[in-house]
Image: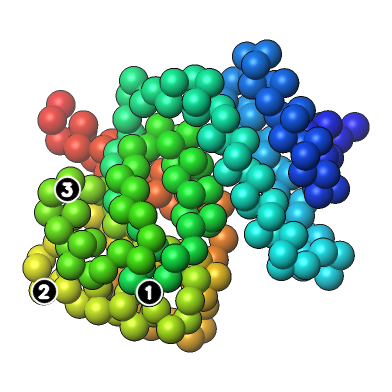
Amino acid sequence: MKDKLVELIADLKLDEAEAYADELIRGGIDYAILFEKVMAGLEEIGRKYENEECFIADLIVSGMMAKNIFAAANLFQGNQEPANVLGTVAMGTIFDDIHDIGKDLMIDALENKGIRVIDLGVDVKVETFVAAVKEHDPDIIAVSCVMISSISYVKELGSALEKEKLLKNRRFILGGASVDNDYVRIPQIDFMSNNFYEGVNYCKAFLQEKYKESSEVNE
């Protein structure tokens, strides 16, 4: 039997889904369980879109609904940082692009996995990314790009990071609707995908391997 929250989200009953999620939050549901339920619902909507059973507007609205649920959960729990942080990601939407739904969903997913995220926001200039890397020393630099016209700025960022020697011992990744491995060619990028589940798993695996190696060296 399908979970009630998953079913409400998949059926695009957004008001009912948010109301039921609020009940679960106030009832003390574990954030990780809530996250998995919401993600499962969004995955169902993604399948419907692929099968032409819903429209791009439905994806956008469902993404906003997921943001509302996660925001409510964070407020209720005091938005506390986990005791054991796996690593740090600096993330933002590249310059001349103000889309934030995919970025924010990935941030929630990463934080749920115990990964600290420095959110640089949207419409982030190349020099702002570079300055953030110098200031925060993240393990991963993550760029979101929805507008095809903004890919040129991602290429510029890759060149700038390489010139400043800021790519050593960290990863540079790209995600968003405009990402297509068949057409986007940026030599400094270590990983790119338009599937944020893959992005989250990549970050987690890299950080686990990186700090596993560090702990073995220190032993």
Between 51 and 124, the residue placed more toward the observer is 124
What residue would you read off at disc 1? Answer: 96
Image position of 145 (left or right of 197): left
Please, what is the three-letter code of the amino acid marked with disc 3?
Answer: Asp
What residue would you read off at disc 2? Answer: 163
User: Could you tell which of marks 3 and 2 lies nearer the N-terminus?
Assistant: 3
Of the residues tagged 1 and 3, which is closer to the observer?
1
What residue would you read off at disc 3? Answer: 137
Tell me the CA gap for discs 3 and 2: 16 Å
Q: Secondary structure at mark 3?
A: loop
Specify whether residue 207 is in view: no
Could you tell me which residue is drawn at 64 percent across and 29 percent down? 34
Q: Which residue lies most toward the right here?
A: 1
31 lies above or below 189: above
Image position of 68 (left or right of 152): right
Please, what is the three-letter code of the amino acid marked with disc 1?
Answer: Asp
Mark 1: few/some/many CA within 10 Å (<14, 14-19, 20+): some
User: Could you tell which of marks 1 and 3 lies nearer the N-terminus?
Assistant: 1
Could you tell me which residue is drawn at 49 percent across and 20 percent down? 77
Please, what is the three-letter code of the amino acid marked with disc 2?
Answer: Lys
User: Could you tell which of marks 2 and 1 lies nearer the N-terminus?
Assistant: 1
Mark 2: few/some/many CA within 10 Å (<14, 14-19, 20+): few
Between 183 and 7, the residue placed more toward the observer is 7
